Amino acid sequence: MSGESVTLDLLQRKMDQFAKERDWEKFHSPRNLLLAMVGEVGELSEIFQWKGEVPKGLPGWKEEEKVHLGEELSDVLLYLIRLSDICGIDLGKAALRKIELNALKYPVKGCSNNVSNTSTSD
């Protein structure tokens, strides 16, 4: 991989090129991409299926398990990026807008799991 920084735009362009080179564009309808992504989410969920709760950082996981997890996460991400592109959605802008909407819906003040609410320095 080159020293190019990874952006949603770069991934979108690479996925578009990948599909064009293989003449797969005709198969990349929103429905087909969504169903393929759901299949990948299933493969991702299988990794965690019998592990119980998994602590942050995945302590005790073997390197090959982490590599496999990265591959499955990437499959989901790449299908999501391709789906958003085919639907004409700017995923980066949509995600930022959603974060802003969530901030309005769940303001810091009053959120029970907010670390600042547990401070005793009030």
Image (tube, helix red, strand yellow):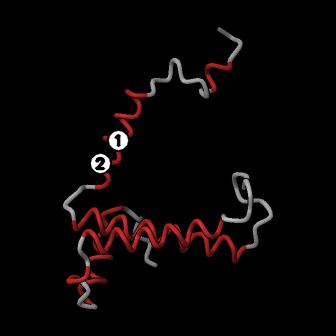
- How far is disc 1 from disc 2 in space, using C-alphas? 6 Å
Task: Identify whether 31 is placed above or below 54.
Answer: below
Is 48 on the left or on the right of 25, as rendered?
right
Name of the residue lying farthest toward the top:
122
Which quadrant of the figure has residue 10? bottom left
Q: Which mark identifies residue 94?
A: 2
Residue drawn at x 69%, y 52% as measured from the top left: 56
Residue at the extreme right of the image, as rendered = 60
Label 2 residue SS: helix
Quadrant of the image containing the C terminus: top right
Relative placement, left or right, of 78 versus 56 is left
Rendered location of residue 116, percent (x, y): 61, 21
Badge number at residue 98: 1
- What's the amino acid at mark 1? Lys
Label of residue 111 in the image = none
Residue 59 is left or right of residue 103, and the answer is: right
> Is residue 77 shown left or right of residue 55?
left
Q: Position of residue 67 (x, y in %)?
A: 63, 74
Within 10 Å of disc 2 (Cα), the crowding (few <14, some 14-19, many 20+) is few
Q: Percent position (x, y) of residue 75? A: 46, 72
